[in-house]
């Protein structure tokens, strides 16, 4: 079940970011990003809440708190992406930076909070990602 939910999240999260590029590229008003993101986040909430509701599972206050914190950070990231795109930053720079930044934060948080260690391949992969972002921003 978790794999299907993660796949759904991957597809919907990617599509919401693509929609931000469409809004910026088509010159739609700055105010259109809020209704657009509201629809995506409401749909995401429904997709997450539905399995809990169907199984009659209770969500603890701690889970709700962490979920709310992650939602606020996610919305902030999406809004920052939208602003970057609307100020003229090219998508081939904005999207790798936002994705790479998230990967870096997960890697650092995994080390700091959970004692996870990155092996050489992981470290090289992250470094190559940052090199790719630098090369994209030059062109």
Image (spheres, helix red, strand yellow):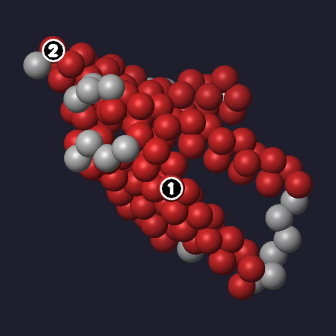
**Mark 2 vs mark 1: which is more N-terminal?**
1
Please indicate whether residue 65 sits to the left or right of residue 99 in the image. right
Q: Residue at x 43, y 50 (%)?
A: 32
Can you identify the residue that label 2 sits on? Answer: 138
Rounded to the nearest whole Å, what is the CA distance between mark 2 and mark 1? 33 Å
Label 1 secondary element: helix
Residue at 50 percent across and 60 percent down: it is: 40
Location of mark 1 (residue): 35
Residue furthest left as drawn: 139
Extreme-right residue of the structure: 61
Dividing the picture into quadrants, the one containing residue 49 is: bottom right
Crowding around mark 1 (Cα neighbors within 10 Å: few <14, some 14 to 19, many 20+) is few
Mark 2 neighbour density, 10 Å: few (under 14) some (14–19) many (20 or more): few
Q: Is residue 60 above or below residue 97?
A: below
Query: Which mark identifies residue 116?
Result: none
Tell me the quadrant of the picture where the C terminus can be found: top left
Residue 117 percent location from the top left of the image: 55, 27
In the image, taking residue 22 as reference, residue 62 lies left or right, namely right
- Compared with 49, 25 (above or below) is above
At a point 18% along the width and 23% down the height, the residue shown is 136
Q: Which one is nearer the viewer's eye here, 106 or 92? A: 92
Across and down, in percent, residue 11 comes to 38, 61
Residue 124 point in image, percent of width and height: 32, 23
Provide the secondary structure element on which disc 2 rests. Answer: helix
The residue at 83%/64% (across/down) is 59
Q: Work out whether residue 31 or residue 107 is closer to the camera in this orientation and state it.
A: 31
Side of 121 where 101 appears, left or right: right
Closest to the camera, between mark 2 and mark 1, is 1
């Amino acid at each position: 079940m978790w794999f299907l939910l993660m796949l759904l999240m991957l597809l919907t999260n990617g599509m919401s970011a693509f929609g931000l590029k469409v809004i910026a590229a088509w010159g739609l008003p700055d105010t259109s990003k809020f209704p657009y993101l509201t629809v995506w986040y409401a749909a995401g909430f429904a997709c997450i809440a539905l399995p809990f509701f169907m199984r009659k599972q209770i969500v603890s206050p701690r889970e709700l708190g962490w979920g709310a914190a992650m939602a606020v950070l996610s919305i902030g990231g999406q809004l920052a992406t939208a602003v970057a795109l609307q100020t003229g930053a090219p998508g081939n720079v904005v999207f790798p930076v936002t994705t790479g930044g998230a990967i870096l934060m997960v890697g650092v948080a995994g080390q700091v909070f959970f004692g996870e260690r990155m092996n050489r391949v992981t470290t090289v992969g992250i470094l190559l990602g940052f090199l790719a972002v630098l090369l994209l921003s030059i062109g």
